[in-house]
Image (spheres, rainbow, N blue to C red):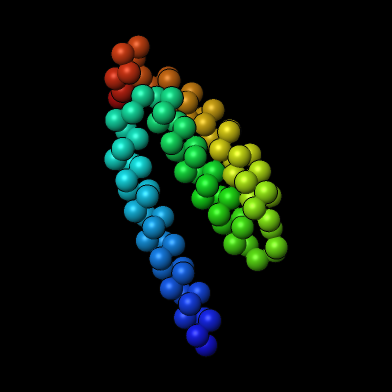
Amino acid sequence: MAFRKLIGVFVVVTGVVFFAVFRALESYAVRRRREVHAVLWAAFTGIAVGFLYSLSGRGHGVLESAVLALAVAVPTFVVLFYRYYTHEDAAGHRIR
C-alpha cells in the first residue's frame, strides 16, 4: 500500500514539474530568436517523450529513451523552425 502512495506522489510531482517547466518555457521562448525558440520547444518535446517512454514499464534503457527523444526532437525542430521562419519578418517580428 505504501508503494502505491509513493507512485501517486511521484505522478503528482511529475505533473507539477512538467506544468511549471511548460509555463516557464512558454513565457521565455517567445522572447528568443526563432532558432532558439524552435530548439527550446523541440528539446522540451523530446525530453517529455523520452521520459514517458522510460516509464512505460517495458524495461527500456536510458539509451533507448534518449534515441527516441532525439528521433522526436529533430523533426519537431524542423517543423517549428519552418513555422517560425515563415511567420516572422526579417527583423524577427511576428506576423499575425
Q: Residue at x 32, y 18 (%)?
A: 92
Question: x, y percentage for residue 90?
Answer: 35, 11
**Left or right position of 75 against 6:** right
Going by the image, does 11 lie left or right of 90?
A: right
Residue beneath the point at 63% across and 62% down: 56
Q: Could you tell me which residue is drawn at 55 percent across and 54 percent down?
A: 51
Question: So how many labels did they put on this image?
Answer: 0
Residue depicted at 34% across the width and 53% down the height:
20
Q: Is residue 43 above or below residue 11?
A: above
- Coordinates of residue 27 in the picture (x, y in percent): 29, 40
> In the figure, residue 71 lies in which quadrant?
top right
- Percent coordinates x, y for residue 15 in the rendering: 42, 61
Outermost front residue: 62
Tell me residue 12's x, y (percent): 41, 68
Q: Quadrant of the C terminus?
A: top left
- Among all residues in the image, which is located at the extreme bottom? 1
The reply to whether residue 2 is visible in this rendering is yes
| Residue 75 in the image: above or below residue 51 | above
Side (left or right) of 9 relative to 94:
right
Q: Is residue 84 visible?
A: no
